[in-house]
Amino acid sequence: MPEPHLRAADADRAAVAEVLGRHMSAGRLTVAEYDDRLARAYTARTYGELAELTTDLPAAEPAGGRTAEAPAVAGPPTGPAGGGPWAVHGWYGSFGSWAGGSSMRAAWASWLSTAVIVVGIWLITSLTTDGWIYPWPIWVIGPWGLVLIAQTIGGQRRADRQQQLPHRAGD
């Protein structure tokens, strides 16, 4: 078990944030609790501070008929370059099941909500004014969407390559 007074890495904080997000999605945390714990996770300096954020949450949760292990504070630091007990899988981080897992879904959800808002604003202003209004939302959502498409495709390729790599002993 890492000593609670040892310093945590950015990868440890990010992994705890991902676990907190899964617990919020499962309904174990309210949005307010999640926001509070997320802020505390990113300001945590030690393993002990990170462990406090998940002590009242179950260690495993069902995910599509399987059980997914929540981070534990037991064992030596694991993952690439000793990333800590909450280290993400493989060299490509959270990429995996859907070209980036929850981080890509969150990015696309942000894009979609922004697109709905700016197109709604443009539509309302177009309907309430005389004449044609330039479709400015394309400059907000277009480049952002292209970047997300490139990241999604790149993430799928990385995930495919990672699955094809032979596993070494000790991985």
Image (spheres, grey):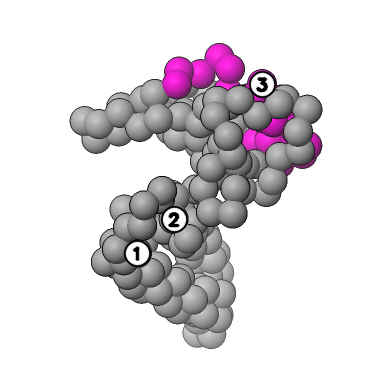
Q: Judging from the image, what secondary structure is the residue with disc 1 in? A: helix
Query: Which of the 4 image quadrants contains residue 74?
Result: top right
Position in image of residue 153 (x %, y %) = 36, 73
In the displayed structure image, the side of residue 87 where residue 153 appears, left or right: left
Query: On the rendered structure, is 41 left or right of 43?
Result: left
Label 2: which residue? 90
Q: Tag 2: residue type?
A: Gly
Marks 3 & 2, CB-CB < 8 Å contact: no
**CA–CA distance in space, label 3 to label 1:** 33 Å
| Cβ atoms at labels 2 and 1 below 8 Å apart | yes
Residue beneath disc 3: 52
Which residue is at a point 76% across and 33% down the rendered structure image? 6
Residue range in magenta is 36-59
- Secondary element type, mark 3: helix
Callout 3 amino acid: Glu
Of mark 2 and mark 1, the one earlier in the sequence is 2
